[in-house]
């Protein structure tokens, strides 16, 4: 699922703001508790809470800095640097264009930051014609690239372990191993699979071009080639490679940041919640005016903790390694019901369970399936009114599917809801019936996990008449069984 980066940045900024506001509100309530007066034991608990608030505030400031950089009005050394783009100028008497890089004045030797100096990008040319190797190599060297030459596919493969290029120019027709075969061997190796390959060939046949691109090439230049065109193609694909690497680095930075959040923010919230619960247990020993504040703190910490957990789950859902294997999913379904029974009873909601007595085998992931069930049951309970029922049922069929359904008697989905219910942060028309927090992330996570298990989701609902969400998973055969007969047209 691809999201608009600007929209995602806006959403993250809003949620950072919301979480920080929640922290500030909790801190204010703790201050009020201190002002109202407590016994020594409760006072000690409050001191622990205030320490957690300080840690939370520091984590949120670090988070905001990581996502959005320095605040407006601050400048860095990088901000003040003026970068000049290479200029393409005509070369006298040729009518061709070559790249001439205008370099800034060289600073004194003792001021050069050698850690920031980057080596020139390397291009490997593979061609059985010595003249082509010479001409192309001269053009690329003049443009500032480091050039490696190989007269055959076999020679190139022998060179690669010692020097991995940034881009490869590969001749299509060569004796021995041709360009297609070389490309396939390169793409089969993980360490070389991401190197962009531009094919060079005198053939201008469309089938040949398609074959070159389908085997992994990124571009195709016909001989005789124009020097300016060749350089342009090389620059373009090297720039794309750099962009991909930057995106990968950003993704790794985000994963690292989310890991820090999981550890630091999660630990601080857990500590804060435990302290709040400890205060709640001492309500009979603290002033009566403190009781509503303590209850509010407990509820607020649960809300913030739930949001952080769902936010982190959403961010990691795209990279969850789902291993679908044959499972008897009855036990997983029953465990999910047991986890949500207490919450349902608190809201006076009845959980009905209709599971088959025999094993219900499906291809599912041991970790992903409980997440799916938790999100569906949480939503059903969250949006159902007191005194209503939530039903979890399961069975086999039709054909090669096993299924389970979560049905409620809540407000259901409107037509507008159905269009955005599986999108990230898709806030729907219904509101939780007991003031619970809703992030709009649960169904988005469900969709991605179910699809990763090769399953599908069916939604049945009418506004005001409840909703029923069914998940179909590929059936797994039990020992000695034959595949189910499929319908014939």
Image (cartoon, grey):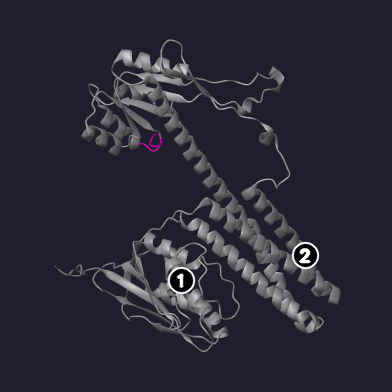
Residue 100 located left or right of residue 222: right
Would you say residue 277 is visible in this rendering? no
The mark closer to the camera, 1 or 2, is: 1
Q: Nearer the viewer, residue 333 or 432?
A: 432
**What residue is shown with label 1?**
417
Residue 190 is a magenta residue: yes
Task: Please tell me the numbered disc located at residue 222.
Answer: none
Q: CA distance from mark 1 to mark 2?
A: 41 Å
Vertical arrangement, residue 74 with respect to residue 300, above or below: above
Which residue is rendered at x = 65% and y = 57% of the image?
264
Q: Nearer the viewer, residue 38 or 207?
A: 207
Q: Quadrant of residue 366?
A: bottom left
Image quadrant holding the N terminus, namely bottom left
Which residue is rendered at x = 68% and y = 70% of the image?
274
Vertical arrangement, residue 390 with respect to residue 51, above or below: below
From the top left corner, tell me how far across and down residue 201 is, in percent.
27, 25
Would you say residue 113 is visible in this rendering? yes
Q: Mark 2, residues whose alpha carbon is within 10 Å: few (<14), some, or many (≥20)? A: some
From the top left corner, tell me how far across and down residue 7 is, in percent.
54, 55
Which residue is rendered at x = 14% and y = 68% of the image?
488
Q: Nearer the viewer, residue 87 or 340?
A: 87
Residue 424 is a magenta residue: no
Q: Quadrant of residue 369?
A: bottom left
Tell me where the magenta segment starts and ends, as one range: 189-194
From the top left corner, tell me how far across and down residue 325 is, in percent.
34, 62
Task: Please tell me the numbered disc located at residue 50.
Answer: 2
Secondary structure mainly formed by the magenta segment: loop
Image quadrant holding the C terminus, namely bottom left
């Amino acid at each position: 699922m691809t999201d608009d980066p600007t929209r995602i940045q806006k959403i993250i900024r809003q949620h950072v703001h919301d979480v920080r506001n929640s922290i500030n509100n909790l801190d204010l309530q703790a201050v009020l508790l201190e002002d109202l007066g407590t016994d020594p034991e409760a006072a000690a608990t409050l001191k622990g809470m205030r320490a957690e608030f300080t840690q939370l505030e520091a984590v949120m400031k670090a988070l905001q800095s990581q996502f959005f950089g320095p605040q407006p009005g601050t400048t860095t050394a990088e901000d003040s640097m003026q970068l000049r783009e290479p200029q393409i100028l005509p070369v006298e008497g040729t009518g061709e264009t070559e790249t001439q890089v205008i370099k800034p004045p060289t600073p004194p030797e003792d001021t050069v930051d050698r850690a920031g100096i980057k080596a020139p990008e390397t291009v490997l040319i593979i061609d059985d014609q010595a003249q082509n190797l010479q001409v192309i190599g001269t053009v690329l060297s003049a443009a500032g690239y480091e050039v490696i030459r190989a007269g055959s596919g076999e020679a190139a493969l022998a060179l690669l372990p010692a020097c991995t290029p940034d881009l490869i120019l590969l001749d299509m027709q060569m004796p021995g191993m041709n360009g297609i075969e070389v490309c396939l061997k390169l793409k089969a190796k993980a360490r070389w699979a991401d190197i962009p390959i531009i094919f060079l060939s005198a053939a201008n046949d469309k089938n040949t071009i398609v074959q070159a691109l389908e085997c992994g090439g990124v571009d195709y230049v016909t001989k005789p080639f124009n020097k300016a065109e060749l350089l342009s193609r090389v620059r373009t694909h090297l720039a794309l490679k750099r962009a991909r690497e930057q995106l990968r680095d950003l993704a790794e930075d985000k994963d690292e940041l989310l890991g820090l959040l999981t550890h630091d923010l999660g630990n601080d919230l857990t500590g804060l919640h435990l302290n709040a619960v400890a205060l709640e247990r001492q309500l009979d020993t603290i002033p009566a005016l403190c009781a509503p504040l303590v209850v509010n703190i407990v509820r607020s910490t649960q809300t913030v903790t739930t949001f952080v957990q769902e936010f982190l789950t959403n961010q990691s859902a795209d990279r969850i390694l789902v291993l679908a294997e044959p499972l008897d999913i009855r036990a997983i379904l029953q465990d999910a019901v047991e986890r949500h029974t207490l919450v349902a009873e608190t809201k006076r909601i009845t959980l009905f369970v209709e599971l088959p007595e025999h094993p219900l085998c499906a291809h599912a992931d041991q970790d992903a399936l409980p997440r799916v069930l938790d999100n569906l049951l949480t939503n059903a309970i969250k949006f159902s009114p007191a005194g209503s029922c939530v039903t979890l049922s399961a069975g086999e069929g039709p054909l090669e599917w096993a299924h389970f359904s979560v049905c409620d008697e809540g407000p259901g989905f409107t037509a507008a809801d159905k269009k955005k219910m599986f999108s990230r942060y898709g806030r729907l028309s219904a509101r939780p019936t007991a003031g619970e927090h809703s992030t709009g992330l649960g169904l988005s996570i469900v969709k991605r996990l179910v699809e990763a298990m090769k399953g599908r989701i069916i939604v049945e609902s009418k506004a005001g008449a409840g909703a029923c969400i069914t998940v179909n998973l590929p059936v797994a055969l039990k020992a000695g069984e034959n595949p189910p007969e499929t319908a014939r047209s």
